[in-house]
Amino acid sequence: MNEALKFPEPQGSVLEQPWLFFDEEIEAAEERLLAFGVKNYHAKSFTHFVYQLGVLEPSKMLSLSRDFRKRLQDCVDTRLLPIKKRLVSKDGTVKFLFEVRGPKSLEEIEAVYIPEKSRVTLCVSSQVGCKMGCRFCLTAQLGFRANLSAGDIVRQVMTVNADPELRPVTNIVFMGMGEPFDNLDEVRKATKILTHERGLKLSARKICVSTVGLADRIDSLTKEEPFRLAVSLNSSDDVSRNEVMPINRRWNLERLLESCLRYSQRTNKKVTFEYILMKGVTDRDEDLRNLVRLLSPIPCKLNLIPYNESPFTPFKRPTEERILEFHAGLLKAQFPVFIRKNRGNDIFAACGMLKRVDPQSSVIPEA
């Protein structure tokens, strides 16, 4: 990139480094573009080129003036994420290893592309590593490295959408690396860009943000949030949840479920609960009874996730017979419950398996 031109921001300061376009919400980005001295429709035209036409090179935006294109080339950074590795599962799932810039060095994150007949879901990361320490999750073994910016999150979607071999993303789940509610400001900003009519125009109903149970952050959510809430429950009593999810020692099940009920009442939205079935740990008959009792007061649905085994954790997947028995027991109680299909296990792309693991290796790289 050429040496950046200096131009005034609306506030009167100067910009000396290329400006990361994807880090700004739509209106704020367009306002900053006005500092070039262009009309409002020129700024909106640039946004349209980037988000809706996927044209990222200013020189190819031929409806813009030559001078505007030249200054954009030098001053605005619309680069996608570098792809360090792209693994394709036998079931069609694709795992991407991206490179992002951390506070002190380059870092790596993963995102997972999950194609289905009627939709395409992208599981995105919100942090490099994670600080929540869930014992069944490989990402937790990395520890916490850095928060991702809104632009890092949005660029995961943009980079995957630019792949000519793949269908465009229709649904997004924040269930990759990191705890989204531990980086809520940037996640909120990203979802606003993803759903904006001049952004990627995705439906807010098709974006789901997951949390391990940060009850105070759930209490901060409003009806206007452009996403649905998912809560990783993964246990039906405080004793076992304390063991597998340390966050429960701060926000126990009673406090967490109270916040979920208030959220549903406040927003008129259902909560999606995620529940990992681990043999002898969360698939007991008492777990089934507890789930019905705990979740019945809350407008919700429950996704059962049979555990994805790996050599790096001690937990095991229940038998298929036990999974179906557990599911049938919840259905008998007239509970809205679904079994999540496992995708991408062979490339370590399934739920709880994101940790830069090469499926040909038995060693997890150091963070």
Image: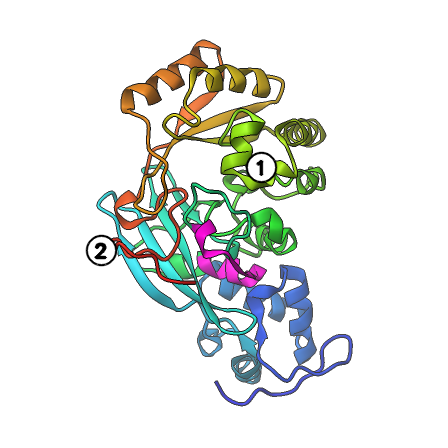
- Counting from the top left corner in percent of width and height, residue 233 is at 53, 32
> Which residue is the site of mark 1?
229
Q: Is residue 108 above or below residue 7?
A: above
Q: Quadrant of residue 339?
A: top left
Can residue 39 be seen in the rendering of this structure? no
For the point 57% across and 71% down, which residue is it? 103
Secondary structure beneath dot 1 equals strand
Neighbour tally class for label 2: few under 14, some 14-19, many 20 plus, Cα within 10 Å: few
Spatial CA distance of label 1 from label 2 is 35 Å
Neighbour tally class for label 1: few under 14, some 14-19, many 20 plus, Cα within 10 Å: many
Q: Amino acid at mark 2?
A: Gln
Q: Amino acid at mark 1?
A: Leu
Direction from residue 218 to residue 151 in the image, left or right:
left
The region drawn magenta spans 139-156
Position of the C terminus by quadrant: bottom left
Secondary structure beneath dot 2 equals loop
- Counting from the top left corner in percent of width and height, residue 306 is at 36, 31
> Which residue is the site of mark 2?
360
- Looking at this view, is 184 or 195 the one in front? 184
Overall secondary structure of the magenta section: helix
